[in-house]
Amino acid sequence: MTRKVSAFFALAVLLGTDFAHADDTSALEGLLEEQIVTTASKSAESVTAAPALSRSISADEIRAFGMRSVAEAIDFLAFGMRTEKRLGTEEIGARGMLFAGDNGNHVLLLIDGHVGNEPLYGSARFGPSLALPLELVDHIEVIVGPGSVLYGSNAVLGVVNVVTKSASTHAGVHAALEITPLSSGRGTVTFGHTATILGTETRFTGGVGYYHQDGPPVTFAPQYTGLDALSGLPNRWSSTGPATGVWGGTVNRGFFKEVPGAYLRVEHGRLTLLARGAGLRLGDPTRAGDFDQPSTNTDEWRGSLSAAYRAPLGTVGTLTTRGFVDVFARDSHLVTSRASSCWYAFDRTCEHDHEGMSRRYGLELQSSFDWTHDGTWVTDVGATAMVNHVGARLSTTDFHSRREFAEETSILTNGDQVRRVLAANAQQVWRPLDVLTLNVGARVDADERFPAVLSPRVAASLSPWKGGTLRAIHSRAFRAPSYDETEGRGLDYVASSWLVPEKVESYEAAIEHRIGAHRTTFGFFDMHFDDVIEREQLPAREAATAIAAGATAARFATEELSVYRLRNTVHAETTGFTAAVEGAALETRLRYGASFTAANARNTDGDPITVAPSASGNARVAYAFPDKWPTLAVASTFASKALVDRAIDGGFSPRPYAPPQLELRATLTGEVPWVPRLGYRVIASHAFHDRTAYAVGPTQRALSATAQPELAPVVRTSVTLGLQYDF
C-alpha cells in the first residue's frame, strides 16, 4: 500500500533537494513512499519502471484529503486524468480529450482487476454510484494513456484499477457514517477476517454501503419558448401546471440519488473469489423531460462474480485460470409533455421507458514465466473467451392513465443479441542491463461484429543516473462500439451496424527523478484518434424512409421529428505535456504534491474538444501533527474554460464556453479524544465556479441569433462530517 500524499508544485521544485539532504531519514522515507503498481503490465513494479505514466493513490491520502469517491480522488490526487460533472453524474477524460455523453466508456474501470464496464452501453461509474465502500479501498492505480495491449476495449484514454484492502490490513469490523447537511449521507460497514478452513488459511474482506442524496435545491434559469421549440405546438405542462410554456426554476423533487452496494473477496490458498452487487436510483433534473419531475429517473443494477485459481508451472511460471459472470440492467424513465417528444399522442403527457440488460460470461487464462528467476526475462501469454448477451426494450404510456400508447418492443434490430468475443495477448519484458528495461506486447481482439483489432505496445525505460528514469512508449488502443450503438434503435435514431472500432495511436516520452521521498515527473504525449463515432442528422426524406421501414422505434413520421445515425467520421488529436511533483518530509509528517496538464486537442474541423479543458491540474499539502493531534490537509483542483457540449451542433453564436473551474477542499482528520478506536473527519469544500460545460433543458439549440444555452449549475459549498469506529 502506498502512503504518499502531496502539496504544491513550485514549493517542491524549490525545496525538494534541500529536504533530501537536510533530513537524515530521507532514504528510509524514500522506501516508505515508493509507489508500486500492477495494472500497467500485470506485474508488481514501481511507477517509475511501469510502461505507462502511472500514479497510485493510497487509502491514507483518500482519507486525509477528504475524498468521497474515486472520481474525486482522480481530480484532486492523480495527474493527466480528470472527471467532469453534470450535477448528479460524472464523465471522465484524459490529456485534453473527453467524449461528452459516452458514459465513461473510453476509460477502463477495474475493481481488483475485474472489468467494471458493461457491454450494452460500455458504461462505468466513477462517482458515488460506483457503490464500493471507500473504507475497503487500499489504493487506486491510475494509468494514463492507452491500455488495450492488456485489457482490450475501452482502455483508450487510460485504466483505473481500484484495489481493495487485504484481510490483515483491515482486520476487524469497521463502521463509518458521513453526513453532508441538507444534501447527502453515506454509511458503510466493512470487515477483514482470517480463519483456517479445511486446513488452509482463508482470508475474508468485504462490506456493505449505502449512499443517499436528496438535494440540495438547485435553480435553473427559465427556458420560455411560448411554443414547443421543435413542433410549434404549445407546451402543456411544467412542474406547476399546464400551459405555462416554462421549463426551469428551483428543483425540489427531481434531484436525488440512492446507491446501495456490497462487495466480498475470499482468498483460500490459491483460489480467489470476488462478488459484487451495486444499485443506483438517480433523479437527474438536467434531462429534457418535464421540469422537477421525480418520475424522470434512472434505475441501474450491476452484479459480478469471479473465481480465479493460480497454479505453478514448474519452477519458473504460474497459470491463472479465471471464470467470471457479469450482469447489468438499466431502466430509464422520461416523463414529457412536449409535443415534439410525445410522438404517439400530442395532447397527452407521455412516459418513455427504456430498459436495457446485458450478461457477460467469460473464461480467462493468463500465464507468466520468469525464466531467469530475477525479472530480467519475463514472458506473459494469455487468452480470453467471452459471450455477451444483450437486450433492450422501449415502451410509451400515458403518464396519468397508464394506458399504453406503444407496446413494449425490442429496440435491437434483430431482438436480443448473443455475441462472442475472443482475445489473445502476449508480452515480453527484457532487462538486458540493470539500467535498461524493454517491454514489448500485443493483443488481438476478435468480435463477431467487425474485423479483428491489433493493439501493440513498445516501451523502453532507461535509468542513466541515480534516481533518474527516461521512458519512451508507443502504443495503440481501441474502443469497440457498444451494442446500443451498433444494434440499437430509438424514437429518433437508427441502428448503425456499419460501425467499426474507434482507434488511437499514442507516442509518449517522460523523464522522472527521485531524491529520497521526492519525485518529479514531466511527460510529453501525442495521440491521434481515428474512426471516432459521431451523431449526424438524416435529411427529412431519409428520415421518413427509415421510419416507414421500421429502422427506428417511431411509428410514424412528423415534421418535428429529427432522426439521427452514427458514423465513424471524426479524426481528433491531442498534443501536450503533464508535469507533476510529490513527496514527503519531516519524517513523512509533511506530504505535498501538484500536477499540471496542458493539451492542444482538436477534431477533424480544427475545433476544440467540447467539455474538455485545455489545461487542468491540482495541488495539495497535508501535515500530520505529532502525538494525538489531528492531520490538516488542503487540496485544490482546477481547469481552464471549456467549450460547452452543444456549442458546435447547437447553432449558438458566439460559441458558448463554461468558465474556468477551481475547487478548494480542507479536511481535518483524527481520533476523538477519550473515545478509543473512534475517528473523525471534517471536510469543507467550496467551488469558485457556478456552472459546468453541459447544456440542460429542452432548448439545447439556439432559438434566436443571440440565444445562449442554460448550463448545469454547481453545488458550490458543502461541509461533511464523518465518524468511523473500529471494533
Image (cartoon, grey):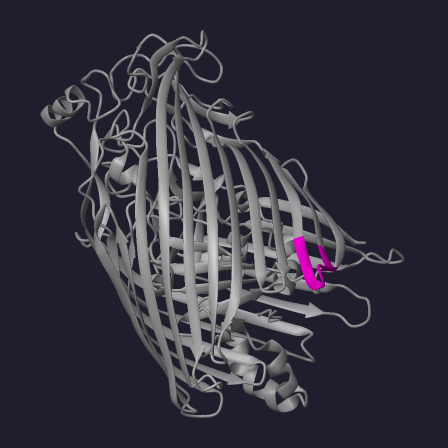
- Up the image or down, 363 lies above or below 245; here it is below
Give the residue at the far left of this rendering. Answer: 541
Main SS, magenta residues: strand
Q: Residue at the spot x=48%, y=92% of the render?
A: 466
- Up the image or down, 91 lies above or below 562; here it is below
Q: Residue at the spot x=61%, y=85% of the render?
A: 19
**Place of residue 362 in the rendered image (x, y in percent of width and height, measured from the top left):** 41, 50
User: 374 left or right of 431?
Assistant: right
Residue 435 visible at all: yes
Q: Nearer the viewer, residue 451 or 707?
A: 451
Residue 41 visible at all: no
**Place of residue 376 in the rendered image (x, y in percent of width and height, measured from the top left):** 42, 86
Q: Nearer the viewer, residue 696 or 573?
A: 573
The answer to if 661 sits in the magenta stretch is no
User: 198 left or right of 533?
Assistant: right
**Place of residue 142 in the rendered image (x, y in percent of width and height, measured from the top left):** 47, 63
Q: Which quarter of the figure is the C terminus placed in?
A: bottom right
- Up the image or down, 681 lies above or below 381; here it is above
Bounds of the magenta segment: 192-205
**Place of residue 76 in the rendered image (x, y in percent of width and height, measured from the top left):** 53, 59
Quadrant of residue 606 in the image? bottom left
User: 316 left or right of 258?
Assistant: left
- Up the image or down, 255 lies above or below 483; here it is above
